[in-house]
Image: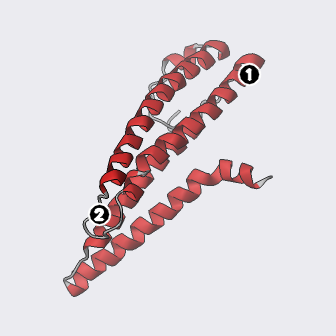
Amino acid sequence: MSVWQKIDRDAERWLLLVFYVMLVITMAIEVLRREIFSYSSIWGEEIVRYSFIYLAWIGAAAAVKERAHIRIDVIMHYLGPRPKALLYIFGDLVMFFVAVIALYWSLETVHVSLKFGSVTDGLRISKVWFLMAVPVGFALMIWRLLQSFLRDFRSLRDGAPVYEGDKLFD
């Protein structure tokens, strides 16, 4: 397996792990500092907040990859492989267009922040690094949606069952 295949398979999982560990460790340190020393820092709260934002957007891309978004799929049980694939492709197309529009507008926000040089209150770091969570998330979603289109079109062409992701409840 090549490096690119490993990155494609596990990128979101590793990024989620990094941001989750950063969030938990920082939060634990801040709770201990507050309870033991009666002192907390502004930077700790910011790190937790921005880690959580990255977690949310990268997690959304991971959910697109695994088709793990919440959906009502009662009708899917009554459809054959071809209509089911077409319905998934339609849903992915709608999500794709929304993601492209959102990517454009989120990049506009990053551009404005970069233009005016806004910084965070506690860390005094450019807000661009943290505002980039949204375009990064939407770019990852677009990438995963393109992969989903290819997978679904192959299923449609071959008459194979479409990938539905794991089910939460049976």
Q: Amino acid at mark 1?
A: Ala
Rendering coords of residue 157 (x, y %): 75, 17
Q: Which residue is mark 1?
A: 160
Task: Name the residue: 45% across, 29% down.
Answer: 71
54 versus 87 height, above or below: below
- SS of the residue under disc 2: loop
Rendering coords of residue 160 (x, y %): 74, 22
Residue lying at the far bottom in this picture: please name it.
Answer: 37
Q: Quadrant of residue 83?
A: top right
Comparing marks 1 and 2, which lies closer to the viewer?
2
70 versus 40 height, above or below: above
Q: Is residue 29 left or right of residue 88?
A: left
**Badge 1: how crowded within 10 Å, few (<14), some, or many (20+)?**
few
Q: Amino acid at mark 2?
A: Thr
> Is the image coloured rainbow, by chain, by secondary structure, or in one colour?
secondary structure
Residue lying at the far front in this picture: please name it.
Answer: 115
Q: Is residue 45 left or right of residue 111?
A: left
Marks 1 and 2 sit apart, C-alpha to C-alpha, by 50 Å
- SS of the residue under disc 1: loop
Rendering coords of residue 129 (x, y %): 41, 58
Q: Nearer the viewer, residue 41 or 63?
A: 41
**Quick one: label 1 or label 2, which is nearer the N terminus?**
2
Q: Which residue is mark 2?
A: 120
Q: Nearer the viewer, residue 114 or 165?
A: 114
